[in-house]
Image: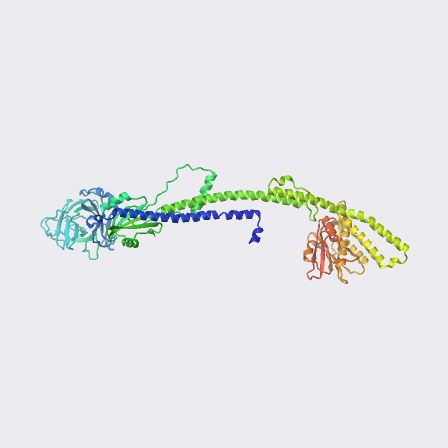
Amino acid sequence: MSITLRTLSIRAKLLWIVLALLIIPWMGYYYVLEMKQFLVQGQKNALLLTANGVATVLNDRAELFNPETGVPEVLGNENDLYAYELDNLIQLDGKLGDWESIQQFANFYTGDELFICSSDYDPDSFSLKNIIGHYQQYLYALFVIDDDKLVYRDLERQSLDTSDQIRMLVQLPNETLEHYLLVANEPGRMSIFLVDEQWKLPLKGNDVTAFTAELAETEWGYQIELRIPRDVIGYRSRVGFFAVDVDSEKTREISTVLSTSPQISGAEPTQILLISPELIKILKGLDQPQSRIWILDNLQRVRAVVGGLSPAVAPESTAKEQNNWATRLIQNIQGYIDTLLKRPPIQFTDVSTEVIHRPDKIFTTILKGTPKVEERLSLDQKAQIIVAGYPIKSGQEILGAVIVEQSSHTILGLQYQLLRSLTLVTILVFLFILLILFLFAWRLTVRIRRLYNTTEKAITPEGRVIEDRIPSRIYPADELGNLGRSITNMLKRLSGYTRYLEGMPDTLAHELNNPLNVVSSSLEILETDVPNIGQNKHMQRARNGVNRLRIILTNLTEAANLEEAMRNEIKKPVDLPGLISEFVDGYRSSYPEHKFLLQTKKSSLVVNCSPDYLAQMLDKLIDNAIQFSKPGTPIIVSTIKNKNHAEITVLNEGPKLPEKIADRLFDPMVSYGKTNAKHSHLGLGLFVVRLIAEYHQGTSWAENMPDNQGVAVTVSIPITHSNPSTVVHK
């Protein structure tokens, strides 16, 4: 991993630095999540504290839970009637204006069972809408009946069940059943009779005056308003209503009976449930925004409820929108953020405030005397509801429980806004930092590349300094500028040292030629004065040493002066295979002890070159092959065409090139192998080959043969497409 990072560019490293900064928004996101948990826990504690406060207000007030002031003690089944609180007194005039506040809670009946009718039943012929309310000491019942034919009571008939009627079944606390029949012979005040179990004959001669009912005809049928004193329907009493339809005035037979308390037998009345008014008054003073407070008795029956869970809607911004590119960019980014983040739903569905019984498990725990707070999902699984409850006590007795509910939408909305703002700010900051770092990296890499190119051009591939300073505009006053100034100083010192080395061969040749001439002339005089001394081995060694010194000086001056000499040389087209063939013939005569093989094609390969320098280059290649070839093995010289280049290769069998020297073989003063008394290895022969090849816009290289049985040195020169008549055949 560390090696990979080291090989990255500066831009890539700066990008990694930017990516490393992502830990900052991650920490912000983690902080927002932690803050959400903290706020939810704070909300739980606040709701539990609210529930405790409400419970404290209601403690030791058993009268608020008296069945006579609220819900009757004995509950009926799930179809019990619910009496809603009215805002005003009901005038028994057959009009619906007084019922406007609770009309939305009406129940509809179209068959023998609640909301169920048989396949052959026509709801347009007879159906019932019923609602019950209470105001002060009275209960009120409204019956809106759709009837295709209204049949009034016939006063001449003794039986009372021969007309359209309302039956009221009352079960007293001693479980005695009383049957009341509401009939009318015309619109207006109705007659109410206490009748027998068959609903036919009155038990008393006069009608009942405790109840009051009014009938009014409508376009679709008729409607009845009924007033019942609350002291008549005690807290242990039960009541049921039945709407009876008679369609024929002749037969007076009952065609349909609709019950507001549908039981299997149809004979048992249902319970009328009343909210505790005093509890409602107390809770209205304790109501909180977006909260719902429930009061339950010790049987988990709802005694009072106030408030709602609807989340607060954030006000829309009224600021004038700016139609510029920055605003549009931010709006587009916010749009993408909204697709990534989960926005809490604005509306959700939960338990209705109209329920009369809450059998939730948490309420069972609270009614055992243990305060509790927990989270639950709404009915549609869209919202998280926090529920906190506290028991209401009177001494050691548990009267009921206070339940405070509140959705976590406020916190989720706050979390969403924070995440949205955090993400937006993070993206904008990152774009800004990325732009700044990109500009910085681009500027830095441009300066480094410029310094690199200038430095590369200051020194030739062979190490010669051609420019001894870096332009001052490349290195201003900073760390990179200090590096440029340091390179300038280094180039100046290296340039002076290079000039010294370039002049050294001429200086050595000049200084050593005089002593060599003295030694050479002294040896000649010694041979003249002393006969037969020329056969002395010491004399021969001395002459060999003088010859080697002269060869060394010649090689030094040759390499030093070759480039300058080639500048004035004129190139001309030459047929390379013919030229190489002539050179090889000469080598065969000069080196009869070695075998030379020539491999060329008869096709013409024309190159633009200097024949003299090409001959000097081939001499160096042949001399190198002779020195390192195995005795008795041939030296192969070949010319081939490779695309637009002619390649001259000299191959000899012998020791292979070491790997660490193969890449530097054509550099000056680089050699390998053993020296002897006749040959010197200054490492200048192949350096001369490279200079001549580069002079001809070519290249040179050496490589071991695939079988490691020899070395091949190759020079590649571009082919010249010229007129064959102008080619020089040497």
x, y percent for residue 314: 37, 42
Lateral position of residue 237 relative to residue 497, left or right: left
Q: Which colour scheme is used?
A: rainbow
Return the x and y of residue 353 as percentages of the image width and height. 28, 48
Nearer to us in this view, 134 or 474: 474
Regarding residue 174, the answer to whether it shows in the image is yes
Where in the figure is residue 713, as x and y percent of width and height? Answer: 72, 56
Q: Which residue is drawn at 27% across and 43% down?
A: 285
The quadrant of the picture occupied by the N terminus is bottom right
The reply to whether residue 598 is visible in this rendering is no
**Farthest left residue in view:** 205
Question: In this image, 9 relative to 376: left or right?
Answer: right
In the image, taking residue 211 as reference, residue 727 lies left or right, namely right
Picture quadrant of residue 135? top left
Give coordinates of residue 144: x percent, y percent: 21, 47
Q: Please state the total of marks drawn on the protein image.
A: 0
Extreme residue toward the bottom, this view: 632
Q: Which of 364/289 is in front?
A: 364
Spot the residue most to the top.
320
* Residue at position x 45%, y 48% in the image: 27
